[in-house]
Amino acid sequence: MANEKLYLYPLWIRIWHWLNAVLFIVLLLTGISMQYSNPENPLLISFELSVQLHNICGIALSINYLLFIFGNLFTSNGKQYKMKTKGLFKRLYDQSVFYLFGMFKKQAPPFPISLENKFNPLQRFIYSTAMYIGFPIIIASGIAMLFPEIIIPQLFGVSGLLVTALLHVVIGFILSLFLFIHIYVCTIGSSIISNFKSMLTGWH
Amino acid sequence: MKLSKLILGCICLLLSFSLYAQKETNKNHSCLKCHAHRTYKYMNEDFGMEIKESMCSNRMIDTLAYQQSNHGMFKCTDCHSPEYETFPHAGNLRMELMYACNDCHAGDPEYAKFHFEAIEEAFYESMHYNRSPDAFTCWSCHNPHTYKTQARIGEKISETVSYDNNICLSCHADVSKYELLTERENINILKSHEWLPNQELHFKNVRCIECHTQLSDSLLVSHVVMSKDSAIRECTSCHSANSHLMASLYRYKSLESRKGSGFLNAVIINESYVIGANRNKYLNILSVVIFGLVLIGIFTHTIFRIFKSK
């Protein structure tokens, strides 16, 4: 890891990131509260409040996603999410081997962080998938459920609303797994909190 | 000779069948030639003129709906006075009391499965009956000329919902019929349900009676229509694993589909989506397993980090 400090996260990315984080966590908690709705469970948020919060945060997250898309279109940050398919599997494998074995043997990371490569190949692959596949699907299905009249009533003999909802829940579940893994992997830095600090100050 | 007799016999038999069928189809012809149309004609013999009049809308019969209804096989005069067969109808015939369901159906073992007696008891508890005991009858909701036991025949839940809600709307969205039954000011149901999120979606997919009747263990459709204050307003009554809908709207359907597929939630799963009530056992188990594996992975990695950093 380079010793000199790198300014990796400009202000707009940090604002987008923390807004996205807070909104996503509220959406996750209210989503679980609705999916597993049970008035007798004190750990769940009430159904009525969950519906309102989920709607508001869902719209806010969608608008915030536009910030991400436009930011990536008009700044160099967009390049961080692009990857070459040639040798991709090898790079993913090398990074995985580092996380599973290399880091315990105090080996140097195979892909050190630089201004051009803020993400290692595994991060680049997972972040791109989450942001350019997962988010569009969950936002589109969420908007569809906010305006259920736009959903086709029947799809292969099954309720269109059900298919949309199932897609929304499944992608939500996968993204929530991403959240847990993301937070954990962020503790792998020069100290446990160094990566969290970087996302607050912008300096790595 | 024998053959010609046989042929003749067959022709006679066919003719009598066709005459009988003709008679059956036309059994209500003399009534419906006027009552199935917006206008009717009669001969004023005093003046030798044919007169055309308009038919009062609540005396009109939708012949197709009548034919398809549960009572479609009856002759008009099976229920109405045979004196109606003469025209012009005598004025006092308007005073005839109409039959209620149990005048025919009570105590009949053939109809025991419909629980007509229990329905009548529930009806007497309903706010409709108690607010207008003289005006409100079975026919206020169930038009005997069009009534069909929809949920038992209807293929789709959405059809049952729309059919049953139209019964409520026939008064609650029609001031003239509403005023026949009560002196109260008309209720604007769109306004009184303003609190309901996604109002249109709820109205299309949930029957009014889901929230406005008391659940009944023995009846498929509860007839204790409650006052507004007692109506269900809790989202979680339906939006939870123990959904109220499974005991009412989906009860019959889920019992039926359980017979076929053995899958408890088959109807609610395939035909509609009620967040909080749709639970798929296998997806739930799968998600818990995947989530557990991720947590175990993170935990193991953490242990290794602590162990190796020493």
Image (cartoon, coloured by chain):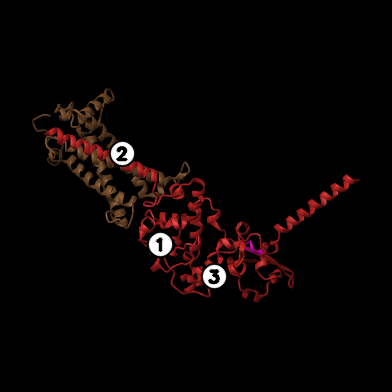
Chain colours: A brown, B red
Which residue position is annotated with label 3? Answer: B137
Which quarter of the rendering shows the C terminus of chain A?
Answer: top left
Q: What residue is rendered at 40% in x and 68% in y? A: B228
Which residue position is annotated with label 1? Answer: B190
Q: Is residue B37 magenta?
A: yes
Residue A29 visible at all: yes
**B74 relative position to B304: left or right:** right
**A60 relative position to B259: left or right:** left
Determine whether the residue tagged by mark 2 lies in a helix, strand or loop.
Answer: helix
Among the 4 quarters of the image, the one containing residue B66: bottom right
Among the 4 quarters of the image, the one containing residue A95: top left
Front in this rendered view, residue B171 or B211: B211
Tell me whether marks 2 and 3 sit on the same chain: no
Q: Main secondary structure of the magenta part?
A: loop
Residue B25: x percent and y percent?
70, 57
Q: What residue is rendered at 62% in x and 75% in y? A: B95
Q: What residue is rendered at 43% in x and 56% in y? A: B245
Give the farthest residue toward the right: B1
Determine whether the residue tagged by mark 1 lies in a helix, strand or loop.
Answer: helix
Front in this rendered view, residue B12 or B63: B12
What's the mark number on residue A134?
Answer: 2
Q: Is residue B188 magenta?
A: no
First to last magenta residue range? B34-38
Q: Amino acid at mark 1?
A: Leu
